[in-house]
Image (cartoon, grey):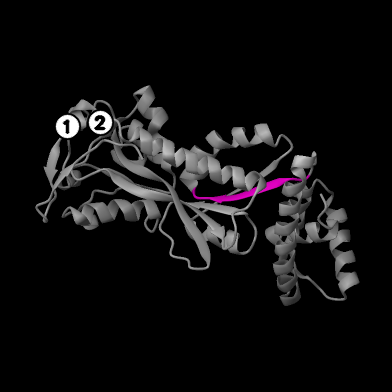
């Protein structure tokens, strides 16, 4: 890696604020990490960290240095990527911030294609909420962020690359499993499993319900979960019906452990977006990832033009506006 080693050690310690974990990340001993930080502080003549008991925090000087080290890291990664066609792939890194569904269900399908071209690539994936991964982007902790919720950020380039469908699932033996369509008003009859209050996924569901005349206070939400996988398992166990991203339920749907319930005035869709710092698109592994994401979105859009399942083909009148809508059954 052509990044200054002391600055790299400083950056990792600053990210983790924990010398032991930083040592594990760097494959060094903890005394070696401490020695590198001490040497850097002595050469600069200032303290970069405050150490009180077991707590480690950045000093104002350390926070200032970190901003410049982030920029150095980004420029270094770009330089290494630019040199890769000449045979130098050592030290090439790809740091991605991603919301949960994208990190767990989408990236694992795309990364093997990148690794075939960049066999020595080191990949870092930081999962988190939309706000968390966008903050990681603007502080140069990641080179690209992939988000599932709307973001209005004039300081960033936000590009929608695909749509994701939030689907309602139930056990295959549930009475609704063979029903052509379920109205929103009927959902108040069943125990319903949702993500935790404040999550983006729950907000999308509650917005759909409110548009169709159902208030969240009417729902029988006995169990809230901060895990999509937990909702799927709970539905399989017969604890209720649940809303999950369709891509997360694909395996369970294929196995037949859950059934998809079609909603009147549905489906519920949300946009999946790429977030980048303003400026030209990055090259190297980040550039290839961007292309794969765009191709993925185009392919899913193409799939969505196919005819819907027979039991999902129906016309409905949107509640309260009198407009006729055709459900296309698309998975986006």
The residue stretch that appears in magenta: 91-99
Q: Tell me if residue 119 is in the magenta stretch.
A: no
Residue 118 versus residue 149: which sits nearer the camera? 118
Q: Residue at x 59, y 37 (%)?
A: 111
**Would you say residue 232 is visible in this rendering?**
no
Indicate which label's residue lies in the foreground, 1 or 2: 2
| Cβ atoms at labels 1 and 2 below 8 Å apart | no
What is the CA distance from the residue labelled 1 to the residue labelled 2?
12 Å
Q: Is residue 134 left or right of residue 56?
A: left
Q: Position of residue 331 (x, y in %)?
A: 34, 37
Element class at badge 2: loop
Q: Residues within 10 Å of mark 1 (few under 14, many from 20)?
A: some
Height in image: 250 above or below 61? Answer: above
**Would you say residue 283 is visible in this rendering?**
yes
> Is tag 1's residue or tag 2's residue first in the polypeptide sequence?
1
Q: Tell me if residue 97 is in the magenta stretch.
A: yes
- Identify residue for label 2: 308
Residue 17 versus residue 273: which sits nearer the camera? 273
Furthest-top residue in this view: 255
Location of the C terminus by quadrant is: top left
Would you identify the image quadrant in which residue 250 lies? top left
Q: Position of residue 201 (x, y in %)?
A: 37, 51
Q: Is residue 152 left or right of residue 329?
A: right
Q: Residue at x 36, y 33 (%)?
A: 303
Q: Position of residue 189 (x, y in %)?
A: 17, 43
Residue 180 is tagged as 1
Residue 181 versus residue 13: which sits nearer the camera? 181
Q: Position of residue 158 (x, y in %)?
A: 48, 58
């Amino acid at each position: 890696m052509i990044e200054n080693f002391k600055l790299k050690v400083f950056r990792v310690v600053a990210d983790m604020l924990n010398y032991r974990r930083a040592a594990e990340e760097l494959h060094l001993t903890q005394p070696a990490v401490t020695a590198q930080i001490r040497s850097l502080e002595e050469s600069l003549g200032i303290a970069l960290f405050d150490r009180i008991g077991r707590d480690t925090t950045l000093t104002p000087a350390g926070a200032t240095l970190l901003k410049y080290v982030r920029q150095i890291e980004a420029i270094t990664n770009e330089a290494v990527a630019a040199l890769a066609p000449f045979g130098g792939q050592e030290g090439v890194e790809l740091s991605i911030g991603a919301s949960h569904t994208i990190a767990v269900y989408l990236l694992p399908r795309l990364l093997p294609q990148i690794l075939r071209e960049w066999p020595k690539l080191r990949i870092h994936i930081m999962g988190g909420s939309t706000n968390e991964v966008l903050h990681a982007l603007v502080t140069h902790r990641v080179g690209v962020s992939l988000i599932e919720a709307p973001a209005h950020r004039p300081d960033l380039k936000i590009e929608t690359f695909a749509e994701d469908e939030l689907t309602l699932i139930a056990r295959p033996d549930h009475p609704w499993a063979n029903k052509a369509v379920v109205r929103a008003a009927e959902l108040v009859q069943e125990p319903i499993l949702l993500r935790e209050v404040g999550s983006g996924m729950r907000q999308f569901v509650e917005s759909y319900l409110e548009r169709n005349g159902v208030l969240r206070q009417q729902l029988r939400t006995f169990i809230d979960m901060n895990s999509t996988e937990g909702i799927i398992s709970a539905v399989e166990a017969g604890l209720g019906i649940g809303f999950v991203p369709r891509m997360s339920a694909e395996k369970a749907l294929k196995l037949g452990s859950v059934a998809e319930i079609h909603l009147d005035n549905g489906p519920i869709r949300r946009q999946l977006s790429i977030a980048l710092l303003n400026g030209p698109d990055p090259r190297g592994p980040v550039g290839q990832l961007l292309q794969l994401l765009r191709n993925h979105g185009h392919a899913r859009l193409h799939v969505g033009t196919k005819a819907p399942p027979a039991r999902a083909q129906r016309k409905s009148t949107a509640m309260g506006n009198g407009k006729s809508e055709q459900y296309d059954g698309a998975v986006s």
